[in-house]
Amino acid sequence: MEAIYNPWPWYVSGPLIALTMAILILLGKRFGMSSNLETFCAMGGAGKFVDYFKVDTRPRRWNLMVVLGTFIGGFIGANVLSPRDDVAINKKSVETLKAFGFDSAGEAYLPTELFSAQSLSDPKIWAILLVGGFLVGFGARYAGGCTSGHAISGLSNLQVPSLIAVIGFFVGGLVMVHMIFPLIF
C-alpha cells in the first residue's frame, strides 16, 4: 500500500504513458485536453452562433472520458491516496513563493492566495485569472493544441511542430517564472 501512497518514479509512470499512447496510436486516436473545450461548446450548441463549432462531435466523444477520468483520478489521488496534506516542493521554492506573499506555498496544491473564495474579492486576482485564462486558451488554439496534446500526443507521433511547441512552452514557462511572475507579485 505504501507504494501507492508515494509518487510513482519515472520508470513506472513513463512507460505507462508510453503504453497508453501506443494503444491510442494503434487505434488511430489523438489525445488532448484543450480539444475537449471545442467538443463541449459544439455539443452545447455553439455551432448555432459560430461556424467554427459546426462539427461532428461523435468521433471526439471518447476524449471526454479522459476529462472525466482526470476529475475522478484527481479526486481519488487528492482525497484517498495522499496521506500528507503538505506539497513536496523544494524548500528554496517555498521560501521564494512566501517572499512573493504566497504563505500557502508547500501546504496547499492550489495557492489559497489565488484560488480561495476570499481571494476572489480582489480585482487583481480576477484580472490575473482572466488574462491568464485568455492567454492559455488563445495559445492552445493558436498552437493547435495544449501542453498535453503537443508534449504527450504530438511527441509520441514524432511531430516536429509539437517539438517546437514544447520548446516554446518551456521557454515561456521560464520567462514567466523568472521575469513576469516577480513583476506581478
Image (cartoon, grey):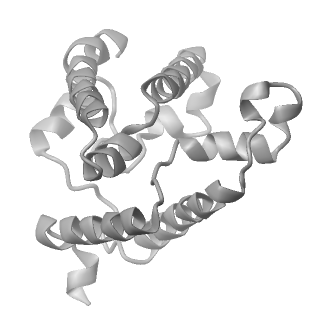
Residue 76 percent location from the top left of the image: 47, 73
Q: With respect to residue 35, does 62 lie above or below?
A: below
Is 146 placed left or right of 161 in the picture?
A: right
Q: With respect to residue 87, does 74 lie above or below?
A: below
**Residue placed at 48% from the left, 32% from the top?**
114
Q: With respect to residue 71, does 124 lie above or below?
A: above
Q: With respect to residue 90, does 167 lie above or below?
A: above
Residue 128 percent location from the top left of the image: 50, 19
**Residue placed at 65% from the left, 39% from the top?**
38
Residue 140 percent location from the top left of the image: 47, 30
Q: Nearer the viewer, residue 136 or 164?
A: 164
Res 20 seen here: yes
Q: Nearer the viewer, residue 32 or 174?
A: 32
Locate the C terminus by quadrant: top left
**Residue placed at 29% from the left, 41% from the top?**
105
Give the residue at the far top of this rendering. Answer: 183
Locate the N terminus by quadrant: bottom left
Res 7 seen here: no
**Residue placed at 27% from the left, 55% from the top?**
87
Give the residue at the far bottom of this rendering. Answer: 1
Q: In which quarter of the image is residue 54?
A: top right
- Total numbered labels: 0
Is 19 placed left or right of 14 in the picture?
A: right
Residue 115 percent location from the top left of the image: 52, 38
